[in-house]
Amino acid sequence: MTDSTFDRRRIPDDATITRWTAGDGWNLRSFRWPVAGTARGTVLFMGGRGDFFEKYLETFAHFHRLGWRVESLDWRGQGGSGRLGARSDVGHTTRFADWTRDLADYATELKARAPGPIVVIGHSMGGHLVLRALAEGALPVAAAVLVAPMLGFADSLPQWMGRVVAHIAAKIVGTEQRMWKVSEKPFSPLDKRMGLLTHSRERYADEQYFWDTRPELKLGPASWGWIAAAYDSFAWLAKPGRIEAIKTPVLILSASADGLVSPPATRAMAARLPHARLVEFGDDAAHELLRETDAVRDSALAAIDTLLDETVPSATVGASTEA
């Protein structure tokens, strides 16, 4: 599955980077990669907190080779989609509902202009937001994949207690104040960051390449407002009946040694979903499963391909109308 000839640091010639305007006028950066002739459908990929879609060009290429049109967005407030706070290096929000609305609106527009089924893949925070949008009944998709979904924080306080602490801290220091200084985890030094994300030094270096060449894409730590909003959204998903009502087939990929999100919370959520399959990786996998070593990454992609073969057979196609 891994193509050693693909350039992970270059936008494909037949792909385009454009802008999409949300209903409230917010301008988001988007990625579109059509296929020649007839597409099997569309893979809509949504990254995690601090991500930008260039990090996943190699993953996009996998699905593109299989006949899928590929699209992606930088979430509002990160990547090339502006910022929600005064500091460009802080990931800030006070509510996740803006993001699920953007996702639902974009998917609805996509369905109208691009024939064929849509499959949505969300990584980390993106996985959380995909799940929430499904629970809101707002995503017109044939299947969903949650990759290391952020359904709880690793090594954290109980969610109810974390929510109280986060809201108190946000009131005391301000919602836009960053919670920590470096890395991806509170109190974790920057030199431990790669170990939290991936065992692949080469793929980890790709992110630094884009930071160096496109510094406006880089985002630092989360604000206290973001942390409080995350706990609020965890509580929203925990309400009985919300997850249980999802009828969309869902594949969940998780790493048992994930140091950023909570594997127990992921297992608990998977048990509540009526049409879910959980695939858990061991100590050889960190948080970014689709940017891991070849063995882990190929296994994760194989699991996704199996779901797509089961839910969206190759015969289910739509004529491509995009150039």
Image: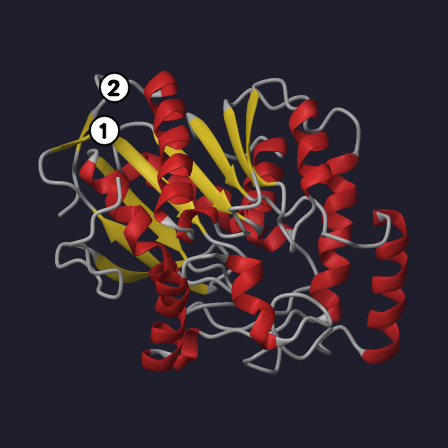
Q: Which of 283 and 310 is in front in this view?
A: 283
Q: Are marks 2 and 1 in contact (CB under 8 Å)?
A: yes
Mark 2, secondary structure of its residue? loop
Q: Please tell me the numbered disc located at residue 40.
A: 1
| 152 to the left or right of 37 | right
Q: Residue 178 carries which label?
A: none
Three-letter residue code for mark 1 = Arg
Q: How is the image coloured?
A: secondary structure
User: Is residue 225 rendered to the left or right of residue 168?
Assistant: left
Q: Which residue is drawn at 21% across and 34% down?
A: 66
Neighbour class for label 1 at 10 Å: few (<14), some, many (≥20)?
A: many
| Residue 204 placement (x, y as % from top left) | 42, 64
| Residue at 35% in and 73% down | 210
The extreme left residue here reads: 37
- Position of residue 223 measured from the top left corner of the image (x, y, whole percent): 69, 71
- Left/right placement of residue 42 relative to residue 291 reads left
Residue 138 in sight in this render: yes
Determine whether 210 is above or below 229 in the image: below
- Tag count in the figure? 2
Q: Quadrant of residue 133?
A: top right
At 27% from the left edge and 28% from the top edge, which residue is drawn?
Answer: 116
Judging by the rendered image, the residue that carries numbered circle 2 is 316
Q: Position of residue 76 (x, y in %)?
A: 51, 63
Amino acid type, residue under disc 2 in the picture: Thr
For residue 49, say whether it is visible. no
Q: Nearer the viewer, residue 128 or 21?
A: 128
Give the class, few, some or many, for how many residues have Cα within 10 Å of label 2's Cα (few <14, many ≥20): few
